[in-house]
């Protein structure tokens, strides 16, 4: 699992491409993650890396993960703190959504912070 590749330099991405493309072992799974909003222009090193991989015969699956909804956050909260009625978790979910914009990482960290501090 290679995370945050939007920050990788061209040489590192070339090395990753070489490992993927030149490998005799064709049973390799490589998972690359990046923040699409930070790779918006076509001359970004990761954009070039991705274009190069798309032009090969190697099967690629792209999964885009969007932001969480208020409803999704509320369902997580209801599962975590099931002693509260759904109306209370919806209120808290709204606050968390406004603070995080629905970013899954930030939602997770925010809920963990509340849990660790005994606020949930």
Image (cartoon, grey):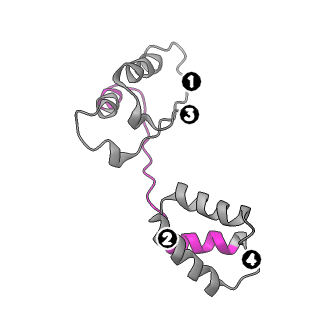
Cα–Cα span, label 4 and label 2: 19 Å
Badge 3 or badge 2: first in the primary sequence: 3
Of discs 1 and 2, which sits in the foreground? 2
Dot 1 alpha-carbon crowd within 10 angstroms: few under 14, some 14 to 19, many 20 or more: few
Depth check, front residue: 115 or 117: 117
Q: Which mark is residue 106?
A: none
Residue pointed to by mark 1: 27
Residue at the spot 63% in from the left edge and 84% down from the top edge:
88
Where is residue 34? Give x, y as percent.
Answer: 43, 41
Label pair 4/2, CB-CB below 8 angstroms: no
Badge 3 or badge 1: first in the primary sequence: 3
Cα–Cα span, label 4 and label 1: 43 Å
Residue pointed to by mark 4: 82
Q: SS for tag 2?
A: helix
Badge 4 or badge 1: first in the primary sequence: 1
Badge 1 or badge 2: first in the primary sequence: 1
Cα–Cα span, label 3 and label 2: 28 Å
Badge 4 or badge 2: first in the primary sequence: 4
Badge 3 or badge 4: first in the primary sequence: 3
Q: SS for tag 3?
A: loop
Q: Is residue 105 above or below residue 29?
A: below
Depth check, front residue: 71 or 106: 106
Magenta segment boundaries in residue numbering: 51-78
Depth check, front residue: 24 or 98: 98
Where is residue 113? Give x, y as percent.
Answer: 65, 61
Of discs 4 and 2, which sits in the foreground? 2
Residue at the spot 48% in from the left edge and 68% down from the top edge:
99
Instruction: Say which quadrant the C terminus sits in.
Output: bottom right
């Amino acid at each position: 699992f290679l995370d945050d590749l939007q920050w990788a330099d061209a040489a590192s991405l070339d090395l990753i491409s070489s490992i993927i493309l030149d490998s005799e072992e064709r049973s390799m799974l490589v998972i690359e993650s990046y923040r699409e909003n930070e790779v918006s222009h076509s001359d970004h090193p990761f954009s070039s890396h991705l274009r190069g991989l798309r032009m090969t015969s190697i099967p690629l699956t792209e999964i885009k993960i969007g932001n969480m909804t208020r409803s999704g956050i509320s369902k997580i909260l209801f599962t975590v703190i099931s002693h509260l009625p759904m109306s209370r978790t919806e209120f808290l979910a709204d606050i968390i959504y406004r603070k995080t914009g629905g970013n899954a990482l930030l939602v997770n960290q925010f809920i963990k912070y509340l849990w660790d501090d005994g606020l949930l």
